[in-house]
Amino acid sequence: MKNKIIPKTPKWKLYHKLINNEVVYDNKSLSRYKKLNTNQSIDSKLSKLKKLREKISKVKNCELKKNANNLVFSDGNPSSKIMIIGEGPGANEDKEGKPFVGRAGKLLDKMLEAIKLNRNNVYISNVVNFRPPMNRKPSEDEVARYLPFLKEHIEIISPKILLLLGSTSLNAIVGSEVVISKARGKWTKKKFGNKDVDVIASFHPAFLMRQPDQKKYAWEDLKMIRKKIGELKIKINAK
Ligand code: URA
């Protein structure tokens, strides 16, 4: 005669019997935490970005703003986990109100394409949001004035990877003691709000146009970014 298999009482039942609890099994799991629905979180991000843009547009007594035609806020995908920071708008950007649309922008697009990225899956902004007259570098005071906006911008976007293009961006975010030729191609972590962000600097595309022999280093940095995207399991939409 075959042995009858007596099902083992599950441990959770034994436990509840022990503490005299009457329990019934319910197939549904308890969900105490509701995940913020993606549409809700993108809506709140967009409204925060709108408010930030308004705040910047109200800046008073600023040489940059006085001479500029447009506020240049950002381009790309606000849901992206990869944020890129340039220096400041040039003539084309000032005209169109969008960052990196001129010659340096075309090179940036090629650099992104080399690691299978584009403006649909990265988010781009600058240290200052108005064009410095005659394309000069923004002064230390100007950088200091716009830095709180930039930090807020980064907190809203909440990227996992932050790419700083050129020395203005590097010095604004990492500190004035570092030089781009030494600091590029190295990962550091920086806190924005309560989030740790992986930060890397590379040469600015405008510099690479003047010094094409330096492109090989930019390529090394781009490959590091591609690798980090894989390590952090960042999903890239393929559009
Ligand atoms: N250079 C920058 O740093 N930013 C731009 O938007 C364009 C050129």
Image (cartoon, grey):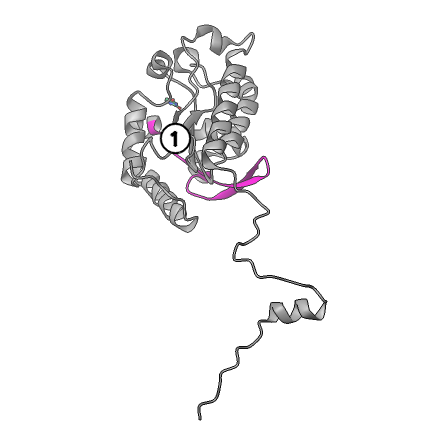
Ligand 1 falls in which quarter?
top left
Which residue is painted at 53% across and 54% down in the image?
Answer: 28
Residue 56: image location, x then y, percent = 52, 16
Q: Which residues are the magenta region?
A: 183-205
**Residue 161 occupies which quadrant of the picture?**
top left
Please indicate whether residue 24 sits to the left or right of residue 79 in the image. right
Residue 89 vs residue 168, the one in the foreground = 89
The residue lying furthest to the front in this view is: 1
- Residue drawn at x 49%, y 18% as measured from the top left: 53
Inspect this view and state whether residue 34 appears.
yes
Residue 211 visible in this rendered orientation of the protein: no
- Front residue of 34 and 180: 34
Which quadrant would residue 108 be assigned to in this image? top left
Q: Is residue 198 shown in magenta?
A: yes
Quadrant location, the C terminus: top left
The residue beneath circle 1 is 77
Report the side of 15 relative to 84 (left or right): right
Give the residue type that dot 1 points to.
Asn
Label 1: few (<14), some (14–19) or many (≥20) C-alpha neighbours in 10 Å? some
